[in-house]
Amino acid sequence: MSQNNNYTLIKNDRPGNMRQLEEFISKDTDKIAGRIGFIELNSGIDLHFSDITELVNERSESLSDASLTISLLLEGQVKFYMNEKPYYLGANDNDESRVAIGKIWSTTKPVRFARSFQKGRRVKKIIINIDKDWLAEMGLSETLDNSASHLDKSLFEFACSHLNYKDWIPSKQAIKAAEEIINPPHDAECMKKMVRECRAIELVTMAFEQFTKPSPAILKQRTDSKPNCRLIKVLNFIENNLNSELTLEEIAKTVGFSVSSLQRHFKTTYGSTVVEYIRKRKLELAKDAMIYEGASVTQACFIAGYSNPSSFATAFKRAFGQCPKTYSQAVAI
């Protein structure tokens, strides 16, 4: 760890060849204030995190290696370019939304990367870069056969595509993991390193779960178009009200859509209906409650909004490939 007048830099003590760190040290040290980290994890993946305020209105350029990248924006907005095509992470400057937003990116060859800085803007984010060798070690390689799971096949197909991305709305557990990467709940350096390693692997696991169902509409979405800010508000409203009985009329009115426009735009952008999305998110909350909070199947059924345990079990297995009892038993063990 090193410091200057503007920022605290957290990095490995051992020598490495991380392009992001080299580019930051050579070009961007005077552009930010706050805390920023570049760490090569023992598991073989690269972790970058930042909690910063941007000091200049400027553009920074570099060369980005091919990788599978998981990004999670906790606060602010990031505008960047890959081979001069614009991409956005977060809402636009006029949106007061504070919902965490994630994306999973795939590049199969190096790309020209450029980042726009905006004076006074706060940015808090996690970036995890994974190379194909790491994926192969995890069992995701060209040797996949017909017995491979849908997730393995979908993830492999995605990882083999260039300049592709998939949207990800992180769970509360994912947001907590990201926060603990930036601010580990320990003073000892050895514990900080272990927490960051564990939480990064947790984020990778939770992000990869997005491939349990294909989302072709998202993958086909134009990469040079700005996200529809009202749809981001829709997601934000849903995430903040998952414990309520949401209606299409209520959601549409909140963001200024008609019900028909809401359904059409949501389906086109996210590959599912609003009702299907809400149902899936509630099931994910139920699963997280069993895994991380020790909730019983009965409690999970209530969290997911089901009054009939049999209907809950059927929907849960359809969504995740296993019965809810499997998760509750795993926690008990």
Image: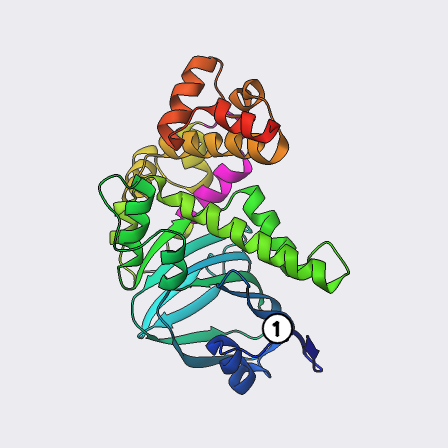
Picture residue at 57% right of the left edge, 49% below the top: 175
Q: Residue at x 51, y 60 (%)?
A: 43
Q: Can residue 242 be seen by looking at this rendering? A: no
| 97 and 4: which is toward the camera | 4
Left or right, residue 208 beside residue 77: left
Q: Horizontal and vertical percent for residue 130?
A: 42, 62
How far across and how far down the image is residue 22, in percent? 51, 82
**The quadrant where residue 319 appears:** top left
Q: Which residue is disc 1 drawn over?
A: 11
Q: Nearer the viewer, residue 151 or 299?
A: 151
Frontmost residue, 107 versus 224: 107
Which colour style is shown? rainbow
Q: Residue 307: x percent and y percent?
A: 49, 14
User: Which stretch is magenta?
Assistant: 231-246
Q: Amino acid at mark 1?
A: Lys
Residue 240 belongs to the span the image colors magenta: yes
Q: Would you place residue 210 above or below residue 298 in this image?
A: below
Q: Secondary structure at mark 1?
A: strand
Q: Look at 52% across and 85% down and name the residue there.
A: 27
Q: Residue at x 40, y 32 (%)?
A: 320
- Image quadrant for the C terminus? top right
Do we see residue 218 in this rendering? yes
Task: Residue 97 in the image: state x and y as whole percent.
Answer: 53, 51
Image quadrant containing the N terminus: bottom right
Magenta stretch holds residue 220? no
Alpha-carbon neighbours of circle 1 within 10 Å: few (<14), some, or many (≥20)? Answer: some
Q: Main secondary structure of the magenta part?
A: helix
